[in-house]
Image (spheres, grey):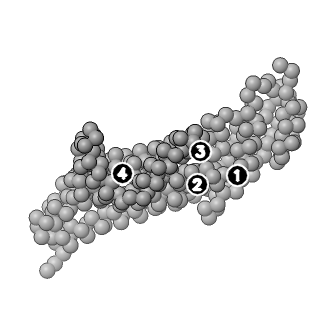
Amino acid sequence: MTFDVALIASHMPEILWAAGITLLMWVAGTLGSAILGFLVAIGRRYGPLPLDLVLRAYVELFRGTPFLIQLFLLYFGGPYIGLALDAAPAGLLGLTLYGAAYFSEIFRSGFQAVPKGHIEAGECVGLTKGQIVRRILLPEMTMLVLPPSVNMVVILMKETAVLSIITVPELTATLSAIGSQQYAFVEALSALALFYWVLVEVTGWLGNLAETKLKFWRIEFPLRPNGMKCNGRFGIKWNINLAHGFVSTEIAIYATQGHRLLRVGKLDTDELFRLMQHLLCNS
């Protein structure tokens, strides 16, 4: 008995088609789950208590049950509640809902890891909640959640193999069918394992590259307190350094009046208020 490489080569067109479906389901499911997970994390952080309870129940339900059972209930049980989906849309929706529950916890832990002093500094200078999320939470959270997010992306990649159970024509279903028809299970499953291994290695390499590129950020933006007029420039220079999964920040607050530099350096809350009062003019 020999390993028949020619058998796999003879079915290459259908294998490549199935691989494309696998990649499409993985990329679309990952993007959808990341976006939905971020919205769930925001809702739990800033939403009212009833919304937090509902979202918490969703997260606990999808994290506490196997992905295979969720797919079965969605695909076979959906018509009982008027949700009749084909295999591919049901698989994509199931993958998105499953991944979003985990992404929401990753993002929520990232939000909680941002020092409260940074958020309070943004509130002191009049930033809205949206500006705080966009200018303070997101930059620091991105650095913190990148490693676990890459790990979750890899997990979702492997979970695409489960979609074959509900007849999604992805790579696992196609190669399993080829193995059954040709009695070549070793060749088919070896090709399947090689595909996922290469994909995991490429994803891990891209994650390490992104972590290296984002290791040091420098952010500078001017600030103007809401409802106030300033006769000078007021802003923050923010250095964010990621090393071994930890975030260290240096915040330099600068202020000018005309062409005269008033202050550069770290400020506590009292100093920040005094500096703002100096910059304010009569309305």
Q: Which residue is mark 1?
A: 115
Instruction: Identify the secondary structure beneath mark 3.
Output: helix
Q: Counting residues from the N terminus, which is met first, the one under dot 1 or under dot 4?
A: 4
Q: Where residue 58 sits: x, y (%)?
A: 45, 49
| Circles 3 and 4: CB atoms closer than 8 Å | no
Type of amino acid at the residue the image marks with label 1: Pro
Q: Counting other residues with Cα less than 10 Å from the Cα at mark 1, is it few (<14), some (14-19), or many (20 or more)? A: few
Q: Which residue is mark 2?
A: 109
Q: Nearer the viewer, residue 50 or 107?
A: 50
| Circles 1 and 2: CB atoms closer than 8 Å | no
In the shown orientation, is residue 148 left or right of residue 231?
Answer: left
Q: Which residue is mark 4?
A: 95
Type of amino acid at the residue the image marks with label 2: Ser
Q: Using the numbered discs, state the Cα–Cα distance from disc 1 to disc 2 in whole angstroms.
A: 12 Å
Q: Using the numbered discs, state the Cα–Cα distance from disc 1 to disc 4 in whole angstroms.
A: 33 Å
Query: Is any part of residue 57 visible from this angle?
Result: yes
Instruction: Identify the secondary structure beneath mark 1.
Output: loop
The residue most toward the top is: 283
Q: Where residue 163 sits: x, y (%)?
A: 28, 55
